[in-house]
Image (cartoon, rainbow, N blue to C red):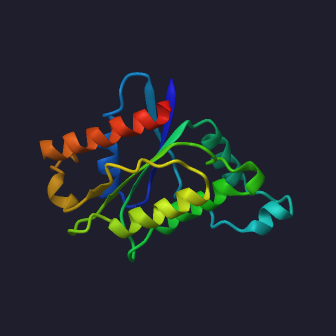
């Protein structure tokens, strides 16, 4: 069984990113198991904690969970033309100490979303830069920018546009091919 960790960049209860991620989690084929990984409980990373052997329990638990994950799907909004702090913090925690980077070599895919027309373009590209630094191969094409996310979700949180579902399926199919490599 291939384990896919899903990290969502929004902590809101009614998060569009979480609703989209829930829809996408169902698109993985048999033999793939997806798991939402909690990142909202992680204190901000402070390297002193690692350097002084005072590693926080939350850091250790998160790092151990991520060590058992085979690949990572990031679903995120854009905050101020960039990545939400919660995702950046999780990436910092997992990449330290550098000798034990939990992200190293794990395939990744990014789906960014926005209620506006740009679909989280800035967040998507900033996240790609970070993933490159922590050595995660990323799905390059198709790039997944989901615009007007509010209108794509029905009252039950399901994506109501078949074209969008087909597009997201192509993203997941490409992600699965990357994982197989």
Which residue extends farthest bottom? 80
Q: Is residue 61 above or below residue 27?
A: below
Q: Quadrant of residue 33?
A: top left
Label count reads 0
Tell me residue 132's x, y (percent): 55, 57
State left or right for residue 125 relative to residue 147. right
Question: What residue lies at 27% left-to-right and 38% top-to-bottom?
Answer: 169
Residue 52 image position (x, y, % from top left): 86, 64
Above or below, 10 against 61 in this view is below
Q: Does residue 156 appear to the left or right of 171 in the view shown?
A: left
Residue at 25% across, 68% down: 118
Pick the residue in front: 79 or 57: 79
| Residue pictured at 50% horizontal, 28% vertical | 2
Report the residue at 39% width, 62% height from top.
124
Q: Is residue 48 left or right of residue 179?
A: right
The single residue placed furthest to the right in the displayed view is 52
Q: Nearer the viewer, residue 65 or 137?
A: 137
| Residue 42 visible to an observer of this rendering | no
Residue 7 in the image: x percent, y percent? 47, 50
Residue 145, horizontal then vertical, whole percent: 29, 58
Regarding residue 9, the answer to whether it shows in the image is yes
């Amino acid at each position: 069984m291939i384990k896919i960790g899903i990290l969502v960049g929004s902590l809101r209860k009614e998060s569009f990113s979480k609703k989209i991620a829930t829809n996408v989690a169902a698109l993985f084929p048999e033999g793939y198991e997806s798991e939402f990984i909690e990142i909202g409980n992680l204190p901000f990373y402070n390297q002193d904690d690692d350097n002084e052997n005072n590693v926080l329990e939350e850091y250790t638990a998160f790092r151990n969970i991520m060590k058992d994950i085979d690949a990572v799907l990031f679903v995120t909004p854009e905050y101020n033309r960039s990545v939400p702090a919660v995702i950046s913090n999780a990436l910092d925690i997992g990449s330290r100490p550098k000798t034990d980077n939990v992200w190293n070599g794990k395939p990744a895919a990014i789906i960014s979303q926005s209620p506006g027309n740009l679909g989280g373009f800035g967040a998507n590209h900033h996240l790609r830069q970070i993933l490159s630094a922590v050595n995660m191969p990323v799905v390059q094409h198709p790039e997944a920018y989901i615009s007007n996310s509010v209108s794509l979700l029905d009252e039950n949180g399901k994506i109501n546009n078949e074209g969008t579902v087909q597009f997201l399926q192509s993203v997941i199919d490409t992600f699965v091919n990357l994982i197989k490599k």
